[in-house]
Amino acid sequence: MSYDNHTPDSRFRSLIDRFGFPHLLTATLALVAATILLGVAAKATGSGLACEANWPQCDAGPYNLLPGSLPSFYEWFHRFVAMFAGFAIVGSALAAWRLPDIDRRVVGLVVLGMILTPVQVALGRETVTQYTMDILSLHFWTAVTIFTLFLVATVIVWTPRLTGTHVTGALALGIVALPAHVVLSPVVDAGIATYSPTMQLTQYAVTLTLLGAAIVAAMVGRRRVTGRALAPLLVAPPLVVLVLFFGRQAVNPALEAPYLVATTALFVTFVAGIVLVRRTGGSSGTNETLSP
């Protein structure tokens, strides 16, 4: 599928001609990921209320538009990047809607992401004005949903250029990232007095990496891999969601065991996937069987 031929009257022609729609979508995905991680940093450092419960203003400068301290800077910078992420989300959705060559699945995914964006903005405001755990959790999971929508859309537009080698590469990345996720979790608490903001931020970065690796392996695997090797690839994404869910709750000792079970199952799935894909020759990228 080509993304290079567009109608002359398209308002987005110059942008798409210069960068390409896949690159626009990839940049949007990166901004969404950055917004999530900055939000985690603001929460972990206790900076969510540092702007004195002002939203969208902060606590310094003309009309309180700027941060007045390091904690309020974390919250202000999170909002600043989120603003650009919102513009990118809307721009990607409008481009997908107007350009004639875009896969309809991609259009649906990014438009849904755009619809969820004002909901996420409203939840962001509520985290400042109320700051309850329920609202914080809903704010986080809505962000992850938007990230997943744009991640799947991005993989769809790049999939024709991806091969079985990318499947094994994604699985290998998951195998490396998963132990790091466990080491950074509250479960491994040998000599660590507190679950520090740096640990939390790094763990969530690893989590997004795991989610990306699992989705790439599953989606590209459906195109390049057949037989038994496909099963672990399809199981990996829901297991990552379980790891993410229990990882957020692992500060509760009662949920440490489910977290460890989920991570062990995911590790076995990644290893089984890479072994089976290599056995079937999927890593060569020669299997062209297409899945709808």
Image (tube, helix red, strand yellow):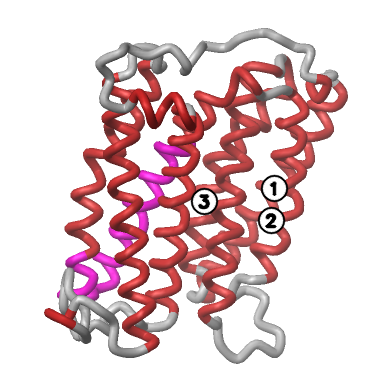
Mark 2 is surrounded, within 10 Å at the Cα level, by few (under 14), some (14 to 19) or many (20 or more) other residues, namely many
The numbered disc on residue 178 is 2
Q: CA distance from mark 2 to mark 3?
A: 13 Å
Find residue 225 and report its horizontal and vertical position in percent. 71, 18
Q: Amino acid at mark 2?
A: Leu
- Residue 242 numbered mark, or none: 3
Which three-letter amino acid code belongs to the residue tagged 3? Leu
- Say whether disc 2 or disc 3 marks the residue closer to the N-terminus: 2
- Of labels 1 and 3, earlier in sequence is 1
Measuring 36% from the left and 61% from the top, which residue is drawn there?
81
| Structural distance between the alpha carbons of marks 1 and 3 | 15 Å
Secondary structure state at the residue bearing disc 2: helix
Seen from the viewer's position, the closer of residues 9 and 240 is 9
| Residue count near mark 1 (Cα–Cα under 10 Å), binned few <14, some 14–19, many ≥20 | many
Q: Which mark is residue 28?
A: none
From the top left corner, tell me how far across and down residue 166 is, in percent: 72, 31
> Is 33 placed left or right of 121 in the picture?
right
Over which residues does the magenta segment extend?
125-151
Q: Are marks 1 and 2 in contact (CB under 8 Å)?
A: yes
Residue drawn 39% across and 67% down?
A: 39
In this figure, which residue is indicated by the disc labeled 1? 174
Which secondary structure type mostly characterizes the magenta part of the structure? Answer: helix
Name which residue lies at 28% across and 20% down.
10
Apparent side of residue 185 relative to residue 17 in the rendered image (left or right): right
> Residue farthest to the right?
279
Q: In the structure shown, which secondary structural element does the residue marked by tag 3 occupy?
A: helix
- Give the image location of residue 109, x and y in percent: 35, 30
Is residue 146 in the magenta section?
Answer: yes
Contact flag, marks 2 and 3 (Cβ < 8 Å): no
